[in-house]
Amino acid sequence: MKIAFRLVALAALAGLACWLWTVFFPGPEKVVLKKISALAATANISANDSTLARAAKAGSVVSEFANDAEIAFDGAGTGARTLSGRDEIREAALGGFANVSSLQVQFKDTTARVAADKQSAEVNCTARVSTGDSKDFGIQELRFQLKKIDGDWLITRVETVKTLQ
Amino acid sequence: MQDTDNSAAEAGGRAPGWLQLVLIGRRPKNTLLRILVLVALCAVTFQFILWPIQVDGISMEPTYHDRRICCVNRLAYWRQEPRRGDVVGIRFSDPGFFFKPNAMYMKRIIGLPGESVSFHAGHAYIDGQLLDEPYVKNPCDWEHAPILCGPDQYYVVGDNRSMPFENHKQGRAERIRIMGKVIL
């Protein structure tokens, strides 16, 4: 009985150690997913946010992108549009954040695939976006490409995925 | 008779009242076990087999109204491929095999792999043949050149064709995105 108890305690301790290891030293997949969910949280704009706060949020969003990042958007009704480089992305983010009363962005069903060299990754997710007090929301499938630059994961490309072709 | 005697003994010699009988039965332990099994069965069923969904939008009117609750049967295409006329749930990004997607398109299959789908005077044509669609009730004036489905693609469209073609989400869905058949 004593041995069994010790074995169970040992297994529990090993489990706890494994869990702590993943908390303190998360794998690249987890880091990338955290990065993407942080991006969604940053892009949320409340109606009470001042112009300055919105500009700061736009800056935070842009800081998640690499210098030569690209956003290729081809949504329904908006046509195809590509933003190249941080400056264009910043301009679009500033304009977009200033023109909405509020913005809610959520990335759902997120999956990450890290390359074998652990220097690049691809994330697929479904973005759910609503603006203002409207209960209506837009849904768009997105694909992110990230690269590890100077030890930090940065987004190099975002593109819309056509669920129905 | 044996049951009654036992339960009376368990209740300290007193016969259980009608309320107790209705709520927890003669044997509370058995009732609890049944409840646990039922909860487990429901959890497994609604997590992995029948996904409850709520319709959002009018693209499937009049068959499925906005806010209606229905279910996606994940086992419908376990042994057979999707068929024309089936209303299906189509996922966006992949949440993983066992997980329910956060959002899905709900559309009807009208074109099968290898077929071409076109619209003329509001009617759907499959490989040039008029498709009988009794579920389409609203007036439609769509005109569109033939679209060829690939070997692994199904053409899906909503039942409400009264909106402009460009505003109606439709198109070719890969087989891998079809999560199941909508029932109820």
Image (cartoon, rainbow, N blue to C red):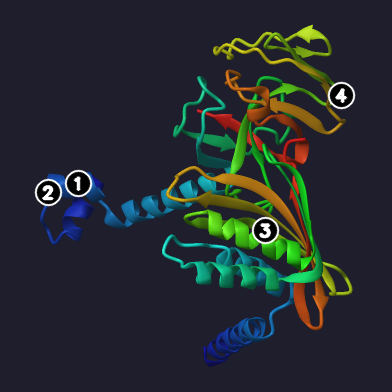
Q: Is residue B43 left or right of residue B126?
A: left
Q: Residue at x 41, y 54 (%)?
A: B36
- Residues at marks 4 and 1, common chain? yes
Crowding at label 4, few (<14), some or many (≥20) Cα neighbours within 10 Å? some
Q: Provide the residue designation for mark 2.
A: B17
Q: From the viewer's perspective, is residue B47 above or below residue B159? A: below
Q: Secondary structure at mark 3?
A: helix
Q: Residue at x 64, y 31 (%)?
A: B88
Q: From the viewer's perspective, is residue B172 above or below residue B26? A: above
Crowding at label 3, few (<14), some or many (≥20) Cα neighbours within 10 Å? some
Q: Residue at x 16, y 59 (%)?
A: B11
Q: Mark 4 or mark 1, which has the lower sequence index?
A: 1
Q: Amino acid at mark 4?
A: Gly
Q: Which mark is in front, 2 or 4?
A: 4
Give me the C-alpha separation between circle 2 and circle 4.
Answer: 67 Å
Give me the C-alpha separation between circle 4 and circle 1.
Answer: 61 Å
Chain letter behind tag 3: A
Q: Amino acid at mark 1?
A: Leu
Q: Amino acid at mark 3?
A: Ala
On the image, the x and y values in percent for residue B39 come to 43, 51
Task: Let me know if residue B161 appears in the view.
Answer: yes
Say which quarter of the image contains residue B103.
Answer: top right
Give me the C-alpha separation between circle 3 and circle 2.
Answer: 71 Å
On the image, the x and y values in percent for residue B96 come to 68, 54
Crowding at label 1, few (<14), some or many (≥20) Cα neighbours within 10 Å? few
